[in-house]
Amino acid sequence: MLRVLMSIGVALWATSAAAQEFPVTIEHAFGQTVIEARPTRVASVGWANHEVPLALGIVPVGFARASWGDDDGDGLLPWVTEKLDELGAQAPVLFDEGDGIDFEAVASTNPDVILAAYSGISQSDYDTLSRIAPVVAYPDGAWTTTWREMIRQNAAGLGMASEGEAMVAQIEERIATALQDYPQLAGKTGMFVTHLDIRDLSTIGFYAAADQRVQFLEDLGMATPRAVREASEAGKYSGRVSAERIDLFNDVDVVVTYGDMARLSELVKNPLIARFPAIARGSVILLANDPMGTAANPTPLSIDYVLEDYLTRLADAVARGEG
């Protein structure tokens, strides 16, 4: 497994004198946020926004507790633990977002900026958070921020836009290098299915073209099937079609979804699902509630952690379809 940790963090922080001057203005879906001075107490809400300051050598004062893929139950994903260890830091305050944002917990950390570039915050959430500290919100729609945009948006809020750009370039370079060993993925189509429930097979749910799980498959050399692109609504991260229209997905080479083999075995007995070629021939990657399943939704620190494993599983799924 490729576990090349982001060693650029401390070096980038050391060169931050070259970053943009303050105040900085961040444009986002709710308008704009002005950050008057370089933040020293950074908090984040939503998914993985804390990984941007960590990768840049900054330990946040608080961020969301991991609720998916946390094998040991400490609220930290393994790549976050590794980065904290690398920085010689303890885990900060972890916000429990099981029932939504814990505004009191966020306020208790006394932040001077709140990162939320990849999140689903509402206008009301944004307004409440803004009474605590300036908020870096998502640029377009809820949960549609790509890992590149997450880095750029959050890094800009830290006054480290150029360092964020360098981070994006280095991740892209590592992906491109790894891809050289997997030419069989080029041009194959990958679909990330969200809804295959044996109790209700009336519809097929999928992550839409704007979702970064789908865009990560494109990063890994695969194409988004035409039916997914056409059925994806602007600004939406997921979609759904009637299972009676399952023939739309005849051009899908690989299906990625959450579940286990027992579930898949039951699904393929359904006459409608059996008409889904990729599923019928076993070109399926089943992700569990573990770090691999979590990192299929890519983040700045998780990409290196799972890259080789994910590429291997995609190549194996392609081979099953051609066998």
Image (cartoon, rainbow, N blue to C red):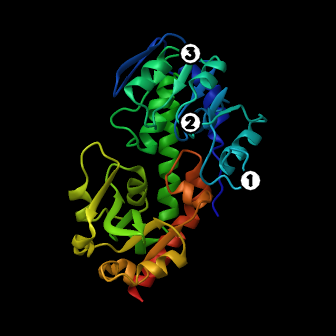
- Amino acid found under the numbered disc labelled 3: Arg
Is any atom of residue 23 visible in this view?
yes
Query: Can the viewer see residue 20?
Result: no
* Residue of label 3: 38
Looking at the rendered structure, the kind of residue marked 1 is Asp
| Distance in Å between CA atoms under marks 1 and 2 | 23 Å
Quadrant where the C terminus sits is bottom left
Q: Residues within 10 Å of mark 3 (few under 14, many from 20)?
A: some
Residue receiving disc 1: 72
Q: Nearer the viewer, residue 134 or 201?
A: 201
Tag 2 and tag 3, C-beta contact below 8 Å: no
Q: Is residue 240 above or below residue 119?
A: below
Callout 1 touching callout 2 (CB < 8 Å): no
Which of labels 1 and 2 is toward the front? Answer: 1
Disc 2 marks which residue? 52
Q: State the count of labels.
A: 3
Residue 254 in the image: state x and y as whole percent: 39, 72
- Which amino acid is tagged 2? Val
Q: Of 199 and 135, which appears nearest the observer?
A: 199
Crowd class of label 1 (few under 14; some 14 to 19; many from 20; radius 10 Å) = few
- Residue drawn at x 61%, y 38% is 55
